[in-house]
Image (tube, rainbow, N blue to C red):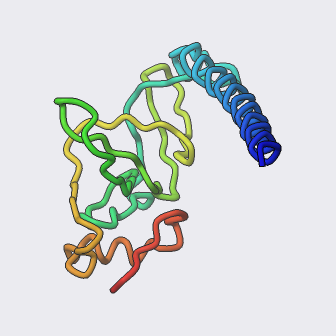
Amino acid sequence: MSSNIGEVLVSCAFAGVVAGIGSFIAGIRELKVKRTIQNTPTCKINTGAIGTNVEVKGFILVEKEKLVTAPISRKQCALYNLEIQKQKGRLSRNGPYWSTIDSFFSDEGFYLDDDSGATALVMVDGAKIIRKGKTEEFQVRSNQFDNLPPSLDTALRANKKKLKKFKLKRA
């Protein structure tokens, strides 16, 4: 009987060591990505080397025929982004902590002008977009999916193929 307990303890210790090594490697990779982002310079479009990562700031340029329709507001825009988040409880006195479950961007890219004399085509897949201005937000409990606001329900149904992780299940 004591040998069975010993085998279980050895197995648990081995699993702990493997999990620890895996966590260490994942942490090193995450640190490398974080430092790459922190060390990415902000520069003008015409001075950035082709094939390198740079951060650019500027104004969005889009031709009228290239505008896309936002799925919820139905307004014309250069880019839209839909995020589905889940409340993860209270992190601090500042309010609840939200975790993004799924998100997608419009498929079209746009041009960015930074007054350097050049423009850059920005493809948004995988890009970090920092936007200013108002966004439309909805808060719906999972037991109230049958009563979704019509614009949100339409947007989720129309873009269900783009949602990779979130699947709206009806009762």
Classify 52 as above or below 169: above
Q: Is residue 113 left or right of residue 3?
A: left
Q: Quadrant of the C terminus?
A: bottom left
Task: Identify which residue, 127 or 75, lies in the foreground.
Answer: 127
Q: Which percent across, then down, holds residue 33?
A: 63, 25
Q: Who's the residue at 39% across and 58% down the image?
A: 67
Which residue extends farthest bottom?
171
Q: Residue 45 or 9: which is nearer the viewer?
A: 9
Instruction: Give 15 or 86, whichever is nearer the viewer.
Output: 15
Residue 88: where, in percent of width, then height? 33, 47
In the depicted structure, whether residue 45 falls above or below residue 136: above
User: What residue is at 37 percent from the left and 34 percent from the top?
Assistant: 130
**Where's residue 162, x and y in %?**
52, 66
Q: How many marks?
A: 0
Q: Residue furthest front?
A: 1
In this rendering, the answer to whether 137 lies above or below 127 is: below
Which residue: 66% across, 21% down? Answer: 32
Q: Which corner quadrant of the image does residue 153 belong to? A: bottom left
Residue 40 lies, in percent from the top left, at 58, 17
Where is 39 relative to 37, above or below?
Answer: above
**Closest to the observer, 69 or 46:** 69
